[in-house]
Image (cartoon, rainbow, N blue to C red):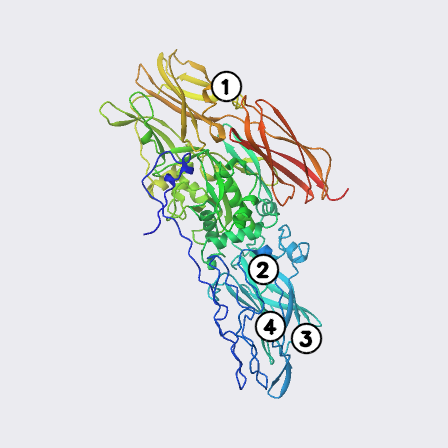
Amino acid sequence: MPFVYSPYRNPCNIGRFPVLLGDGYKKSSCSKPAYTNPCVNPCVNPCVNPCVDPCANTYVNQYNSPYAYSYASPYVNPYVSPCATPCDTPFATPYANPYGYVSTSHDYEKREVVVKEYVDDCTKTQVCGVESSLLRVSKVDLLKCRTGPNRLEHHTHYFHDEHLVVRRGQCFNMWVDLCRPFNRSCDKLHLELKLGHIPSIRDGTFVTIPIVDEFKRDCWGAKVVEIAQNRVKLCVNSVPTACVGRYQLSVVTNCAGGRFALPYAPENDIYMLFNPWCKDDCVYLSDEAERAEYVLNNMGKLYYGTKQQIGCRSWNFGLCEEGILPSCMYVLERSCTPCSGWGNPVVISRVVSDMVIAKKDCGVLMGNWSNCYGDGVAPTSWCGSSAILRKYHKYGGVPVRYGQSLAFAGVTNTLLRCLGIPVRPVSNFCSAHDTDVSLTTDVYLDEKFQLIDHMNRDSIWNYHVWNEAWMTRSDLPSGFGGWQVIDATPQLTSQGFSRCGPTSVAAIRSGQVFLKHDVPFLFAEVNNDRVYWQRKCDGTFGVVHIEKDVGGHCISTKAVGSDQRIDITNFYKHPCGSSERCCALDTAVRHGLRRCAYPLPCAEDVVCEVGLKGDGPCIGRDAVLTINLRNKCSSPRTVTLYSQAAATYYTGVRSAFLKRDQTIIELKPSECRPLDWTLTYDEYKEHLVDHASLRLNLFGHVAQTKQVVATRYNFRLRTPDLAIAPACDAIMGQEVPFKITFQNPLPCVLKNSVFRFTGLGMQRARVVNYGDIAGHASVCLNEKFIPRCHGPQKLLASFDCPQLTQVHGFSDLVVKQHC
């Protein structure tokens, strides 16, 4: 019986989902790939008396890791010995492993392989009475220096990796060192690239690259561009549809003296990435400034909070940090998906969306919305992706604890940018979790205007962060390429997997919900009304109030070339009330979405609205809001108003009730009356959860007309920022002192406080366990950092403790290359 996983029964999801739902979740299991026998082809010897088979003993895999590469024997192709006098016994014992080389595919940075010479080193052969030399390859030089032409021309110089990193659809150069001069007339040479456990020519994961005179469109090829004594320089052209990943390279020669294949060496592996600079690549992006922002930029901005209180924090994507590219490739390998699909950005996007959030023991980052993070790192404490991905890689695929949508989007951004797909994080404020895709979020009240908890399954998240990736969509009609939504924190499953996208933004805007993938749910996230139902005396329910267009506001991302926030809501939906918006809604309903028209029982003469004072309340102080009641008619109205305050998770799920009030207000004709509403620190101090989110529910009725007044207002308590200032000018490679200041906004002691720092090209995040901080005390921390990169840089910092989260700061500085 397959394992069934229900996210609603996971204690980490307490703050993510409002109630336990009945529908289960089927987990995708990671299958164990078979270990390839390196001696499948026995050694062949055409001599009169055949040599003893050196591969007589079948290799036995003594390592059970399901993710280990089945690296082939160094004798990739059996050695053929046409000697006149045959060898009697080339080896005293059957061949086992003459180099003693054992590998698991993911320990990339800890191996050194020395390729030894063959035991039987026949250099002269007699073929048809003519003496000839076997053309052996002594080594290859992939010209993989980070400052060399290959890396610079392919825009991969920023990767802190010693392998050759190239982009598909573009040429790169390499040298091949031979044992003798290369004779074009009788010597043959080709390259072989292998990807994955079972490379296949049909699937494009076993690539043979011949020597050609001229490159052909959509064909692999290698040109001889220079011959210097025993060295041959090749210019290799890859196709713009090649699978991305880590390829094993072999050089194969054929001549009258026999066939030779260069033994496998991990240092000759080649990373192949998508190419947004190549017009024939399906991720091509024409604007250079956009390529610099969405492919190469190491830093970004992520937005959180509420639509009235949009907060911003910097995020380090870690593209320049050591080990980040092997970690990203490791995530692909752990997905257990066929590498034959890794040339398609649609497939890669779905793999990444599925792998980022952990399901039991599969996935990078474990989600936790419970406000209990003692056995891991609080989701708001992360400053970047690299620490998460490297930890996942280092511990062999054990999910890292913990993350929420902001961290998931940051990690997804790093993975896709590393693989070469243009991508940006996007924050949607008032993001509807519509469980039945009805385009409504339903709120149920009893006869006394109290919430009926077990019926209120829908929720609207204060904010939700996803990603947009740029690609063409050959699987969709024309016009639906461009930006595609990829959500690594999906609120529902897609085809049995916890993933979402890629979803065409153009399809969402036009209501084309029949197009793949997952358009109906994304459309409902940004097009949603809130419907209030009240139970009657006979037990039936009726609609008493509707709030229009409550989902999908202030959809935000970072601007190109600056740290400014830009609003891209108009890319997701047309203006409210426009004919285009009505047409999109009609299209969505015609193709399966449900949308009902609910008549209201009476005219709505009284309007209730809530607003902030200034920038909003700060944590540690009383929260004061303004309630505005407006009488639109020419007669007086008497309103009985019930207010309910609650502490909530940012997902809209209630954590605790804080207080209830009842007020009767007399409104004169056409009067607009403001009312101050206050929640004291003592009333909320014991009940806050991370993000310090609060909600004010207002329900009531008008005595003269029986009209029901209803609204919900979500807000957050602002947390202090960390102030970071350098003490002197920054010079690359030299220590720079920084002063970090922070003041505790609470009267209580902050226990087990931790500071985290990243940026400036640091290869590892720095963690400072500070300890306890007294109530209202100020902290001054002095730390020294060494910038590893010159030019504009950022130092990012976060502060975390059980009593206070979502505290962070950054410092912009220009690092000089020299004094």
Q: What's the amino acid at mark 3?
A: Arg
Asked if the residue at tag 3 contacts the one at tag 1, i.e. Cβ–Cβ closer than 8 Å, the answer is: no
- Of circles 4 and 3, which is in front? 3
Query: Counting residues from the N terminus, which is met first, the one under dot 4 or under dot 2?
Result: 4
Which residue was labeled with disc 1?
622
Pick the front one: 58 or 741:
58
Which residue was labeled with disc 2?
270
- Of circles 4 and 2, which is in front? 2
Query: Counting residues from the N terminus, which is met first, the one under dot 4 or under dot 3?
Result: 3
Which residue was labeled with disc 4?
189
Q: What's the amino acid at mark 2?
A: Ile
Which residue was labeled with disc 3?
180
Residue 775 figure quarter: top right
Query: Counting residues from the N terminus, which is met first, the one under dot 1 or under dot 4?
Result: 4
Q: Residues within 10 Å of mark 1 (few under 14, many from 20)?
A: some
For residue 436, say whether it is visible: yes
